[in-house]
Amino acid sequence: MDPIRSMLFIPANKPTWIERSPTFGADAVILDLEDSVPTKDKELARENSASMIPSLTDAGQRVYIRINRSNYMYDFDDILALTCPGVEGLMLPKVSGIDDISLVDALIGEAEFRKGLKPGSIALAPVLETASAIIKAYEIASHPRVALVVAASAKNGDVARSLGFQWTIEGTETLYMRSSSISAARAAGKVAIGGLWQDVHDMAGLEKWVKGNRQLGFHGELALHPSNVAVINDIYTPSDTEIAYYSRMIAAFEAAQRDGRGALMFEGDHIDLAHIETARSIISLNQKIKSK
C-alpha cells in the first residue's frame, strides 16, 4: 500500500466540501456518512458520495468511506451504494471483533459481485474504539480484507467512553491502547493510523500530539480540519536532516563492509546491519512519498 500520512474527514452531506477536498493535500479523504451527518441527511450523504467519487478519482484523490452501523449489522445500503470504482476502502466504526469484519467482508463481497467488481477490491479500515476491539486487535488486523487499522484516542469520544479514560495531551492513559494497536497492525503487516486531534485551531498542540504518535510507530493520522493536514504530512514525512543522517550511516556501513567489518561506530553510536535495515526503510518511505 502507498503511504498514508493523513486521512481527512469530510462530512458527506456537504457537496462543496467534497468537491474541494482534493485541494486540501490529504493523502486520503474519508467521506463520512456516520457521526458528522445528521440522521435526516444520511441518504443525501450517500448520494453525494456515490455521485462525486468519479471526480475525486479523476483528481487523483484516494477515497475512504466511513459507513454507518445499524442495530444488527453495518448498513448494507451504505455498502451497496459505495462499493464502486474509486473507493479504496470502507471505514468501520465501533468494531467489536472478527465477527464484524467477517460479516462486512461477506456484504462487500455480495456488493462487488452485483457491481461486477473484482472480488476483494474494496479494503476495510476498522476503527478500534471499543474495549473488545482493542483486546482483539491482532485478530481484526489479520483479516485479508483489512488494509489499515485505526486506533484513535480522541478526547471524550467512543473509545474514551468504552475504556473509561480521562484524556490528557500527555497520553499516558492511552499509551497501552495505542502501542498495542500499533503492534497488532504491524504484526499483521497492516497500516496503523492514529489521531484524533480535536482542538483544530491549536497548531502547537496538534504538532506535539502528532509527533508523539509518530514516535510510537503510527504510519499516519486522522484529521478533522484541512488546516491540520500540512502539519500531519510534514511530521510523518522523514525530514531532510533524517535522510541526510541515514544516508551517511549507510555510506559508512558500506565502506566498513568493504574493509571486512560488519559493525562500526557511527557518530557516537554502535551500528550494524539491523540499524542499516532501519535506515534503508526510512529512505524508501521518503522516496515513496516524494514520488506521489
Image (tube, grey):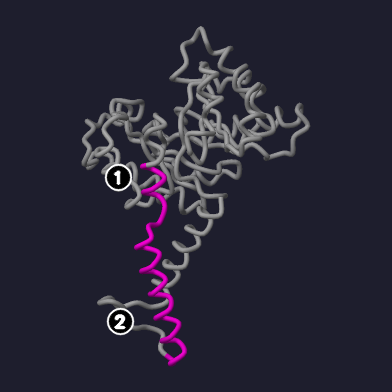
Give the residue displayed 47% in from the left and 58% down from the top. Answer: 286
Three-letter code, disc 1: Tyr
Three-letter code, disc 2: Met
The image's mark for residue 237 is none
Q: Would residue 233 appear left or right of 52 to someone viewing this image?
A: left
Q: Would residue 96 appear left or right of 59 to someone viewing this image?
A: left
Question: Residue 75: x, y in percent?
Answer: 58, 20
On screen, residue 270 above or below 256: above
Q: Would residue 154 appear left or right of 64 to someone viewing this image?
A: left
Q: Nearer the viewer, mark 1 or mark 2?
A: 2
Residue where numbered disc 1 is placed: 176
Residue 199 placement: quadrant:
top left
- Give the alpha-carbon distance from disc 1 to disc 2, as whole Å: 34 Å
Q: CB under 8 Å between callouts 1 and 2?
A: no
Give the residue displayed 61% in from the left and 39% down from the top. Answer: 60
Residue where numbered disc 2 is placed: 265
Question: Residue 197: x, y in percent?
Answer: 32, 33
Sequence-wise, which precedes: disc 1 or disc 2? 1
Residue nearest the observer in this picture, 20 or 73: 20
On screen, residue 244 above or below 163: below
On screen, residue 147 above or below 76: below
Q: Residue furthest top?
A: 40
* Residue 107 visible here: no
Question: Residue 236: x, y in percent?
Answer: 40, 49
Q: Is-magenta flag for residue 8? A: no
Give the residue displayed 29% in from the left and 25% down from the top. Answer: 156
Residue 221 placement: quadrant:
top left
Q: Residues within 10 Å of mark 2 (few under 14, many from 20)?
A: few
Q: Is-magenta flag for residue 253? A: yes
Q: Which residues are magenta?
A: 231-260
* Residue 218 visible here: yes
